[in-house]
Image (cartoon, grey):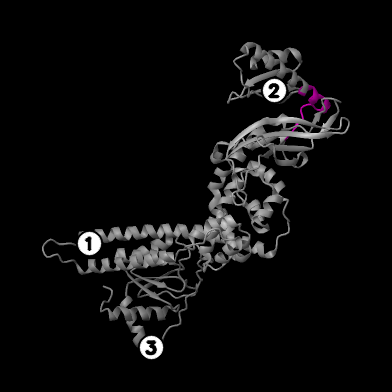
Amino acid sequence: MAKRMGEELQSACQYPVQCKVGTDYLNITTSFEIAGEVITGNAEMKFFFPDTVIDDEYVEELTQDFVSKTLEHLDQYRLTNPANPGAQKVYVTTIPLVNPISQQDVEDPIMQVSVHTEVYCPTCEKIVRDNIHSSIKIDLNKLHQHKEDIIIKVIGDSLVCGDCKHVLQKEKLIMKDATSNQIIADRDVGELLLLGTMSNQGEMQSFIISAMGHEDFFHEHEEAFWNAYSYVAARKWEVFLQELTKRELAKVLPEFVTAIPVDLSKERLLLLAKGLDLNEQEKRTFWVKANQLAIHHYLFITLFGWNMKQDSLLLGPNRAEFIFRYLPMPEELKSFHHVHDSYFSNERSDEIIKLQDRMEQQQQRIRTLQQENGRLTEKLGQAYSRISEQEASSFTLSNEVRNKSDILKIQQLKGLIEELKTELTKLTPIKQEEEQVQKVVLTEEQSEDEEVRSIYEIFMGKKILILGGYRSKQSREEKEYTIYTHDARNLDPQFYELLKNADIIITLTRYISHRAMWEAKEYAILEGKRIYFTAFTNIPTILTKVAKELLEEGDKGN
C-alpha cells in the first residue's frame, strides 16, 4: 500500500512525496516537500481483511481511498496557508491520566482513546471534525510502555469544511473513551503548548525526546530538589502538611504510626500527622516519602501534560508553586517551563527569598560535611591499620612484652580513634553554620617571676610550634629556643613543614579548626612528638604551662 500510495500521489501532484511504513506496521506516513518545507501526514492501517475479499483488490480500494483523502487534506492545507505553506504550527498536549494522589478510582485498566479536533461551521450549521487518532490503547498497569503514546500533536490551526469549503479555525481538541464514547478531555486548541512548526521537525522531535527523558534527568539532580523542598516544607510545616491529599497521608503515615484504622477521613489522618512529635530531619523524611507519587506522575506525563489550574487545586498553592517552579528541568524544555512558570506570581516574599538562601547555604554545608566525613572515616581506617602494624611489630616471642614507647603510641592511637568516632557522629547535615575559626594575635608580655623564667631552660635548643595564632612583626627573637606560629586556617605546605620540623607542638583549642587539630594530633602520635593543648593566647603563659607539664612528667624533653 505504501508503494502504491507513493506512486499515485506523485503522479497526482507536483510536489516531491514519500510514503513510509511505520515501525509498528499499523500506519503509513506521507511527507510532501512544499516550497522547501516538509509537510507530513499519517494514514492509520488498522483494518481487518475478511476471508470473503480478494486481498489485492481490497488493498487497491484502500489505497485509492487514502490517496483521495490525502490529496483533499493537501488542498485544504494549501488553502489555509496560501502565503507561507511551510509554516504549519504544531501544538502538543497529552492524554489525561488519573493522578494517583487524587481520590479518583480507575475501573478499567485498559484505555481506548480517540482524538480529534473540531470547529463549528456557521455556514453549514454543523460541527466539522478532523480525526487525529481513531484508537490509542493504553494499559494503565504497564504505563512505562506508553510514554510516547500519551503525547498528542495537533498539526495546523485550521481546517476546511468539506461542504462549503470555508477555512475554519480549529477550536477544540476532543479526547474520548472509544469504548463508552465519553469525553475525557475538552481543550481549547489556542491554549495548547506550541511545539514548533512543520519546518523544524528535527527540533520538535528533540523536545519530545527531552520530555520523555525528564524522569531520568530528575533522578540525576533529585537530591538537591528533595533537600530544598523538604527544607521549605519543614519551616512551614502546618501550612504544607494541610495540602497533602488523603491518599498521600494514607501512604506515608503507616511508616510513622502503628495500627492506623482503615478508611479514615483526611481530617483524621491530618490530626494523626500533626500529632507526630517529629524533629526537623524526621519532618523532611516524612515530606519526601509523602510527595514521591505526585512527583513521579508529573514527570511521567511530562510538562506537556501539566494543567496549572487543575493541578494547583489538587496540590494546594504552596506545593504547586514549589514543584512547578523548581523541579529540575532539561535545558531544552526551559522555554516550555517558562510558560507554566508565568502562572504563578513573580512577587516573592522576603521570607521565601531568605528560605531559598538558607537552603543553598545548607546544600553547600552538606557537601562540605560529606567530604569531611569521608576524610575522617579514611583517617579512622588508617589509625586502625597503624595500631595493627604497631602491635605486630612490638610483639616479642620471648616474653610477650612490648616496649613502653610502643605501648604509649598504641594507647594514643586508640584515644585518637575514639575522638574521631565522636567527631563523625557530629557530622550531620542539620548543622546550619560553617565552622568559624577566629584569627588571633598572640601576646608576649613577659613575667618578672625569676622562677618562672628559669624553667624556660627546659626548651633549650627546641623548636616550638604554636598552632591557631600568629605573632606580630614586633616580636623578639628567642636565643635559647625558637618559636614558630601558624594560624592553621589553611592547611598549606608550610603547615605540614612546620609540623615536621617542630620538637614540641602546641594547639590553641579555641582558635584552631577541627581538621587542623586532627592533623596535628595524628602527626604528633605517629612521629613521637609532644603535643599540648591550651586556651591561652599569651606566649609566656603558654610556655610556662607547657614547661610545668613537662616537669611534672619528669622529662626534660631529652
Most distant residue in the left direction: 398
Q: Looking at the picture, how far across and down is residue 403, in whole percent?
A: 19, 67
Between label 1 and label 2, give the one nearer the viewer. 2
Q: Front-most of 357 and 130?
A: 130
**Picture residue at 57% right of the left edge, 62% below the top:** 269
- Which segment is the magenta one? 73-90
Which residue is depicted at the point 30% across and 64% down?
527
Q: Earlier in the sequence, mark 2 or mark 3?
A: 2
Q: Could you say which is closer to the camera, residue 21 or residue 226?
A: 21
Viewer-side label of 3, 1 = 1
> Where is residue 58 drawn, in percent x and y?
65, 14
Q: Amino acid at mark 1?
A: Glu
The label shown at residue 35 is none
Vertical order, 265 against 166 (above or below)? below
Residue pictured at 27% horizontal, 68% vertical:
411
Work out whether residue 309 or residue 393 is closer to the camera in this orientation and state it.
309
Badge 2: residue crowd in 10 Å (few <14, some 14–19, many ≥20): some
How far across and how far down the image is residue 203, in percent?
Answer: 66, 34
Confirm or deny contact between disc 1 and disc 2 (CB under 8 A): no
- Secondary-structure class at tag 3: loop
* Cα separation between marks 2 and 3: 103 Å
Residue farthest to the right, as pictured = 123
What whole-number distance in Å separates the C-alpha atoms at marks 1 and 2?
81 Å
- Mark 2 lies on residue: 31
Please state which amino acid type lies under the numbered disc 3: Asp
Which residue position holds label 1? 391
Instruction: Of the two numbered discs 3 and 1 on the same chain, state the one appearing first in sequence.
Output: 1
User: Which residue corresponds to mark 3?
Assistant: 449
